[in-house]
Image: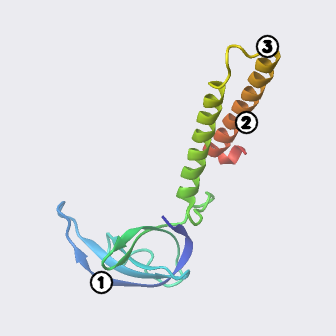
Amino acid sequence: MQSGLTKIVSCQGNGVWNPPDGSTLYKQEITLENGVVGQCYSQAPEPWFKAAGTEVVYEITGDSAYGKKLRIKRPSVGGPMPTQGSGSDKRGESIKVQWAIKAAIAATDTISVESDFEYLKTYSQQIGQLARLLMAEHEMTLNPEHG
């Protein structure tokens, strides 16, 4: 889903919702500086992000008959900001790494017992290099601050 850092252009209360747990949530209609328009719920009738110009991190969590469903959060201090499609990018990279590992394993299945020793030795070294590269890539994906 789309997410990012932007500012509030307008935020207007538009009713309440009482979920089964007995709490009260306040529906907010929001317009963001980047053009995204949608709704979210807050626990207070006047949420912290009500004022125009307030910097927020948003995430589009889905669509409804009333517009885009938004999740609004405070920007993290000193941490990385999400970018457009950041969750999808990480998932895509993880899928690529998994595919590459499976491909390397599958490639070893193509070696026949009748192959000569030098060919097997070279092929084995190439598979080892590939595995090390894949593990390094996977580690960088898990810990981007160390890359």
Q: Nearer the viewer, mark 2 or mark 3?
A: 3
Q: CA distance from mark 3 to mark 1?
A: 75 Å
* Displayed quadrant of residue 126: top right
The residue singled out by tag 2 in the image is 133
**Residue 115 position in % (x across, y down):** 74, 16
For label 3, the SS is: helix
For label 1, the SS is: strand
Left or right: where does residue 19 sit relative to residue 12?
Answer: left
Confirm whether residue 131 shows in the render: yes
User: In front: 9, or 134?
Assistant: 134
Q: Nearer the viewer, mark 3 or mark 1?
A: 3
Residue drawn 60% across the image and 49% down it: 93
Please name the amino acid that badge 1 sits on.
Answer: Asn
Q: CA distance from mark 2 to mark 3?
A: 24 Å
* Displayed quadrant of residue 110: top right
Label at residue 117: 3
Please name the amino acid that badge 3 sits on.
Answer: Phe
Badges 1 and 2: C-beta atoms under 8 Å apart? Answer: no
Please name the amino acid that badge 2 sits on.
Answer: Leu
Label at residue 65: none
Residue drawn 74% across the image and 22% down it: 124
**Residue 146 position in % (x across, y down):** 71, 43
User: In front: 118, or 97?
Assistant: 118
Residue closest to the far front: 114
The residue singled out by tag 1 in the image is 14
Residue drawn 80% across the image and 23% down it: 122
